[in-house]
Image (spheres, rainbow, N blue to C red):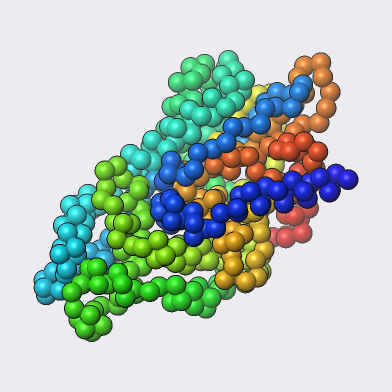
């Protein structure tokens, strides 16, 4: 009976989440096409959280969050499309629209030197918002006098600054909180684990499929005519498909900057959807439970999951553990935890976005919050947990009679079996 209730709940949640196609969602909200460049605050509003079960109180939060919005990582990501536009301008091959785009891009380009990968003001804003809402959602925890908060970050500056922004909000909500911040190479083994063993071996797979879909979904003829006035020059002088994909990356990440030019408007809804599909398939093969990579890629975060479990085992009084890192950790962790549809196994990549959509998992600032509840003083009962992915309640892979709350003992046993079966 409990299994039936669990299955029905998961099915209902999945049908609700996927009621609208990805094509429709992107047409309604073009920012979603950005995949991992999606501004956390451009994602649809969160729903109200389910109140704690009667007789229970929150006593612990275990968290992992990605840094906020940033400049693009590589200098080449700006340089390559800029070089193509400048070449076309020098040879008189830009349309009037192409000249306008180049002028806007040139102004933005001036801000990029030595900024690659840096947190932007949008990224800082995202984490201030997340920290503020943590305190608002769980005041009985985060406004508790003298609350210990252990916050740790990878050694990357954008992650450190994101941690500080979130902690500033928690300190503002509770000046008595005792916040400890830590950054060290010694923490990297679980905050940003390197691929090794089976994960490294399986991670080499999928190149053929990625290349196939990259070519299948890139149709540059129309947008080339938006930029360039000579089709023969385009054919002879540049790789139009490559230019489209490179410029799309710049356009998608403009939402990481306040007051930036809107380059997404030059793409049609179908082009945005197709470019997103390329990324959705790529990310699924690289980090999801894809059969192509042997369903092993979520286990890239096995050290992080073990740390989450082992740290929770030590908690005897109210506190919080905050961890800060990258989307290449949040995404596979969400898949490893099997939050909602994140752990879906999809054989046919043509239909992947009917089930699995990367923008639901890892916008800039994405985060997983595991919130632990215990019986109030004088009451008896099991420790319960609910999972929030980007502040949205998610189903988890064990039966429950009181969704979104699950017995921690059941979850812990499930995840430990999963980790033990994978091995090292």
Residue at the spot 66% in from the left edge and 31% down from the top edge: 50
- The C terminus appears in which quarter of the rendering? bottom right
Residue at the spot 33% in from the left edge and 43% down from the top edge: 120
Q: Position of residue 252 (x, y in %)?
A: 36, 56
Q: Position of residue 287 (x, y in %)?
A: 57, 60
- The N terminus appears in which quarter of the rendering? top right
Residue 59: name its quadrant. Answer: top right
Task: Please say if 284 is above or below 253.
Answer: below
Tally of numbered discs: 0
Residue 172: name its quadrant. Answer: top left
Tell which of 270 and 60 is nearer to you. Answer: 270
Residue at the spot 18% in from the left edge and 78% down from the top edge: 230
Residue at the spot 62% in from the left edge and 59% down from the top edge: 355
User: Can residue 271 be seen?
Assistant: yes
Task: Please say if 60 is above or below 3.
Answer: above
The answer to whether 407 appears left or right of 289 in the picture is right
Tell which of 28 and 423 is nearer to you. Answer: 28
Q: Position of residue 278 (x, y in %)?
A: 47, 67
Tell which of 99 and 280 is nearer to you. Answer: 99
The answer to whether 81 appears left or right of 47 in the picture is left
Q: Position of residue 148 (x, y in %)?
A: 58, 24
């Amino acid at each position: 009976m409990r299994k039936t209730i669990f299955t029905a709940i998961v099915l209902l949640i999945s049908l609700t989440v996927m009621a609208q196609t990805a094509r429709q969602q992107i047409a309604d909200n073009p920012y979603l096409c950005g995949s991992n460049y999606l501004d956390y605050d451009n994602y649809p509003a969160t729903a109200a959280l389910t109140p704690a079960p009667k007789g229970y109180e929150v006593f612990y939060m275990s968290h992992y969050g990605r840094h906020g919005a940033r400049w693009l990582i590589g200098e080449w990501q700006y340089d390559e499309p800029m070089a193509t536009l400048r070449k076309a301008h020098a040879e008189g091959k830009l349309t009037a629209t192409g000249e306008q785009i180049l002028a806007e891009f040139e102004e933005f380009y001036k801000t990029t030197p030595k900024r690659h990968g840096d947190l932007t003001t949008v990224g800082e804003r995202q984490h201030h918002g997340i920290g503020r809402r943590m305190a608002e959602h769980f005041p009985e925890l985060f406004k508790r006098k003298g609350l210990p908060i252990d916050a740790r970050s990878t050694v990357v500056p954008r992650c450190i600054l994101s941690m500080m922004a979130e902690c500033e909000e928690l300190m503002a909500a509770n000046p008595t909180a005792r916040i400890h911040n830590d950054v060290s190479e010694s923490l990297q083994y679980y905050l940003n684990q390197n691929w090794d063993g089976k994960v490294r071996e399986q991670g080499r797979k999928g190149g053929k499929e990625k290349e196939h879909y990259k070519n299948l979904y890139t149709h540059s003829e129309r947008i080339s005519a938006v930029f360039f006035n000579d089709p023969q020059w385009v054919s002879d002088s540049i790789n139009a498909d490559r230019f489209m994909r490179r410029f799309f990356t710049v356009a998608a990440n403009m939402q990481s900057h306040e007051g930036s030019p809107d380059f997404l408007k030059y793409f049609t809804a179908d082009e945005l959807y197709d470019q997103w599909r390329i990324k959705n398939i790529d990310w699924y093969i690289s980090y999801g439970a894809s059969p192509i990579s042997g369903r092993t890629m979520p286990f890239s975060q096995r050290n992080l999951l073990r740390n989450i479990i082992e740290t929770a085992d030590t908690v005897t009084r109210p506190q919080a553990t905050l961890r800060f890192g990258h989307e290449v950790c949040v995404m596979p962790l969400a898949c490893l935890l099997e939050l909602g549809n994140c752990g879906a196994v999809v054989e046919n990549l043509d239909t992947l976005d009917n089930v699995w959509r990367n923008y639901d998992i890892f916008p800039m600032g994405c985060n997983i919050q595991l919130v632990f509840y215990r019986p109030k003083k004088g009451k008896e009962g099991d420790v319960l947990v609910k999972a929030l992915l980007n502040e949205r309640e998610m189903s988890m892979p064990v039966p429950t009679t009181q969704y979104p709350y699950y017995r921690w003992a059941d979850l812990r046993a499930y995840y430990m079996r999963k980790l033990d079966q994978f091995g090292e």
